Amino acid sequence: MRLRLVAVKTRGNPNSNISLLPNRPFTTSSSSSSSNIKQLKQNHAKLIRNGNIDDILTVGKLIADIAISNPSNLNYARSIFAKLEFPPNIFMWNSMIRGYAHSPNPKEAIFLYTQMLDGGFSPNNYTFPFVFKACTQLMDLNLGLGFHGALIKRGFEDSDVFIQTSLVNFYATCGSIETARKLFNRCSKRDVTSWNALIKGYVRSSRYMDAIKVFRIMQNRTDIRADEITLLGVVMSCSQLGALDMGRWVHAYIDKNHVGLSTNLGTALIDMYARCGNVDVARNLFEGIREKDVRLWSVMISGLAVHGLAKEAFDLFMEMQRVGIQPDSVTLTSVLSACSHAGMVKEGLEILDKMRETYNLEPTIEHYGCIVDLLGRAGRLEEALALIRNLPLKPDVVLWGSLLVACRAHKNVEMGEMVAKEMLKLDLYHCGALVFLSNLYASTGRWSEVEQVRSSMKDLRIKKPPGSSLIELDGDVHEFIAGDRSHPQTTQIQMMLDEISSLLSIQGFVPGTRGIPLDIDEEEKEQALFLHSEKLAVAFGLINTRQGTAIRIVKNLRVCEDCHSAMKLISKIFNRLIIIRDRIRFHHFKDGSCSCKDYW
């Protein structure tokens, strides 16, 4: 959008009512910035030569053009601003505040605002959107609350759509989403920027279903059309929820409304399809995009990796390099993850060895975490421990956690105890370490130690996050919590679980109760296992979908051994494809087998 100015008086009048609208983007390209600043310096020199340097309108426009051209030019704008031979007007203050609000140094915008007030100038309706932009950049809720109070005192809160949108964006970004929603509802006029601010706020707050609900309401408005920012937020929400049907609808909306498929949007769609369990569509979409950057390649490799398609991920990694795309740190994390899921120890260790020399990348804690996971899954626990002990970086709880998972899988109680205690040294309140330790003791029947850990958690007021599973049906996402009986179809779900239990027993299935951290009888343990969230979700799916329909579930935790074994048989008994995305990877259960080949 072009810069619009409203000028009344010019020469020498510091109160000239010139206002800069707050929706002109920065020029961020280094080449365009270089040519722009060269032209602006020529204009500056011309003003000095022609004696027009004291013309407030002309100088004001020059300062504005420099300040908002690129953050690297702010020092130049500041030097002109500081050397003015007359008091700057509000337009000049706004230009400088805006420039710094969008820069890597937003604190300077707040300083300039304070300086402006000290100089006797009053902010106008264009000042506050820039100030709230700075507060948003700083993620300082208290600072913004103070400015909100000043805005109300000056009577600006409901006077301007830009102010209202900046308030919604500020509160949504800083995590105060309920306040953002109330302000959004009060907006006199909502443009696409207002809707985007709220959708992004819900995404940042991990309230993905609410983001989709806002988008649906937005679709009922004839005066608003979704743009790329809207669609990125909605696609990301579908990815997190595993809402494939909704994601398909959004993809169809993009095609129907001829929204250009930018690299960002294409990458988001590929990620969505992969994370929703349809990696074949993700791959087809990937192949159809001509201009592929490193992020696009990385997302596709990661998508293949989490589905256990390690060879395909590795082949794509090699192809990426053949076409001249240099892998980055994220790419290598994805490839190492693929190696870990497939037990490709040799290949994973070779990549780590090549990182500095071949890829010019310094291994990060994430890369070492993948290697610890790789060695741990392969049962090479001592090597994994030695790697952690000799790291050039300080191990974090995530790194130790990878080894702890391997210790439990390979029943190495002694090392598991040591690892859990190392984690608790780093974070006394780490729920995962305490829960793993409790489960580790439970798996060996050491119930007194289990009780000690549980008492410690109770004293520290630490609660294990409940297992949660999501399943989409007809565009709506249903959530099931472990042990929950609040769903409207609870009676039917329980009947289906009873049927599943009987059919599993006929097949000779024995529930894996050994690792349940409860000193109760076997029957109660079996009941507890059958109320795991993924089993509730699969029962719901069997009730509400036609024979032959794939059942797709997203779980927030790692799927347990009992549920993994049960799902294999359920897929065979009911002749269904069951796809579960847990915290680690995808499991495709079909005809009594899992795509992970029991290596997870």
Image (cartoon, rainbow, N blue to C red):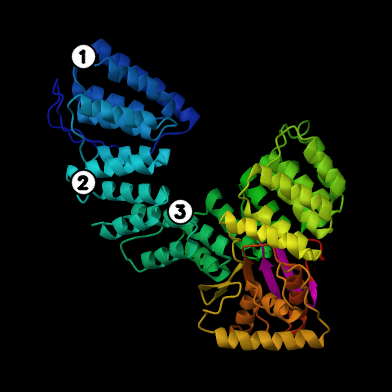
Kindly report which numbered mark, 2 or 1, lies closer to the viewer in this rendering.
Answer: 2
Q: Is residue 581 magenta?
A: yes
Among the two numbered marks 1 and 3 on one chain, the one whose residue lies closer to the N terminus: 1
Mark 2 residue element? helix
Residue 241: quadrant of the picture:
bottom right
> As rendered, which of 354 and 66 lies closer to the eye?
354
User: Which quarter of the figure is the C terminus placed in?
Assistant: bottom right
Amino acid type, label 3: Glu
Q: Is residue 353 magenta?
A: no
Q: How many marks?
A: 3
The image shows residue 571, relative to residue 411, as above or below, that is: below
Residue 558: quadrant of the picture:
bottom right
Amino acid type, label 1: Glu
Q: What residue is pinned by disc 1?
A: 85
Callout 3 environment at 10 Å: few (<14), some (14 to 19), or many (20+)? some
Mark 3 residue element? helix
Mark 1 residue element? loop
Among the two numbered marks 3 and 2 on one chain, the one whose residue lies closer to the N terminus: 2
Q: CA distance from mark 3 to mark 2?
A: 33 Å
Q: What residue is pinned by disc 3?
A: 228
